[in-house]
Amino acid sequence: MREEVAQLPMKKKGGDLWVFNGGSAKAPNPKFYSLLTSRDRDFLLSPTGNQVKVSELEGKVVGIYFSANWYPPCLNFTPVLSGIYSQLKERGAQFEIVFVSSDEDYDAFNSYRASMPWLTIPFSDLESKRALNNRFDIEGIPSLVVLQPDGNDDMALRDGVELVYRYGVRAFPFTEERLDELQREEREKHERQTITNLLSNTARDYLLAHPSPKQVTVASLVGKTVGLYFSAQWCLPCLRFTPKLTSIYQKIKQMLAEEKDEDLEIVLVSSDRDEAAFESYFATMPWLAVPFGDPTIKDLTKYFDIQGIPCLVIVGPDGKTLTQQGRKLMNLHSERAYPFTQAQLKSLQKQMDEEAKNFPRFEYHAGHSHALTLVSEGSGGGPFICCACDEQGSGWAYQCIECGYEVHPKCVKAVNRGNAPG
């Protein structure tokens, strides 16, 4: 499950995008053609319900989109993908998307499809949908998967949803060369990064502190671990996460004070819609903030490609980004995630792996009728959002192989197993 976020003006695990670059021949690529047709069907449905021959996709980049209207992360991602799709179409890109539905009934399917500007596998074609899910080993939705021009499965690029979230239209045409170029740009950007050039500009060299309007210099953060907290008062997931973040922040600060170790600071980067809301929200927080309306806010949002909030970006003492998954790490490990280094995270993963040795292979959960299987990171265990407590999980989970229902090991242990379904 993908973490709950609010969309800005925005796996479950999985997140795969298979992209097909057709050749120049008039006849469809046999492998491509066989994927999207069946014994009784050689067409797809257009947004208006018309039939479009699969052969018309020849020569285009085609993304196969696995999704459903009952799952919030899909509802979050679909408008993002739709925006990318529309931009590429406006630029004349040879690009198409084919929706593969996991909706539970025909009305739900039609309602969801109405929000999509691309093509669709007919809802009634259960055989094709099942074959596509099996063919690409889809374990979670939303999923998009990217295949290079020769259709070689070994060249598949995983985490297509993440690629769209991370790069947007810049990811097109999803080739290895293009992604290498984008990663090289990120590395160069990272090398030039300092906490000073992230948080200050020519007109301001300070941040807001409490009691407001107290100010502290950006220079005072040099050498500290800094969390950039992208959040807003209007965002319900933010309102749920902020108290947890406050508690963890205070525990880390207390621990560091006792150990006289490196310091931690958090800086609010607000997406609030007016200054009154910003001031009200900031008043609930014990850390610093970029002033409301400062141009640095838009610069940071673009720089880190923030697609949804809450988001916590962790910058290390050297001014370089440690991770953009601070929220996930806080939810998963609480104060133990500090200082967010690879060494610390590997140590925490090792502890989780040791604990998992004592977990039973199968379990039941009161909120689900099917048996749940213990899965690891390598076999599909993370990251996810626990269906029991709505918190982030990663590494190990109890998962329903049939439908993707997933819970933390700690949550499955909390139920009365005597009430498990037979």
Image (cartoon, helix red, strand yellow):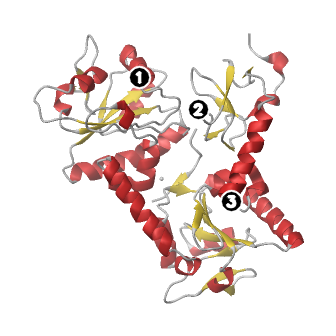
Residue at the spot 48% in from the left edge and 33% down from the top edge: 69
Look at the image and tell me whether residue 240 can be seen.
Answer: no
Secondary structure of the residue carrying tag 1 is helix
Q: CA distance from mark 1 to mark 2?
A: 16 Å
Whole-percent x, y for residue 409 in the image? 75, 33
Crowding at mark 1 (Cα within 10 Å: few <14, some 14-19, many 20+) = few
Marking on residue 340: 3
206 on left or right of 24 = right
Whole-percent x, y for residue 230 in the image? 58, 64
Residue highlighted by disc 1: 135
Residue at the spot 73% in from the left edge and 22% down from the top edge: 361
Front residue of 167/273: it is 167
- Residue 143 placement: quadrant: top left
Secondary structure of the residue carrying tag 2 is loop
Q: Sequence order check: which comes first, mark 2 or mark 3? A: 3
Whether 397 is drawn above or below 364: the answer is: below
Residue at the spot 78% in from the left edge and 28% down from the top edge: 359
- Residue 358 placement: quadrant: top right
Whether 78 is drawn above or below 169: the answer is: above
Give the residue type that dot 2 points to: Gly
Front residue of 273/313: it is 313
Residue at the spot 50% in from the left edge and 84% down from the top edge: 201
Whether 259 is drawn above or below 182: the answer is: below
Give the residue type that dot 3 points to: Phe
115 on left or right of 295 = left
Front residue of 401/386: it is 401
306 on left or right of 236 = left
Quadrant occupied by the N terminus: top right
Residue highlighted by disc 2: 380
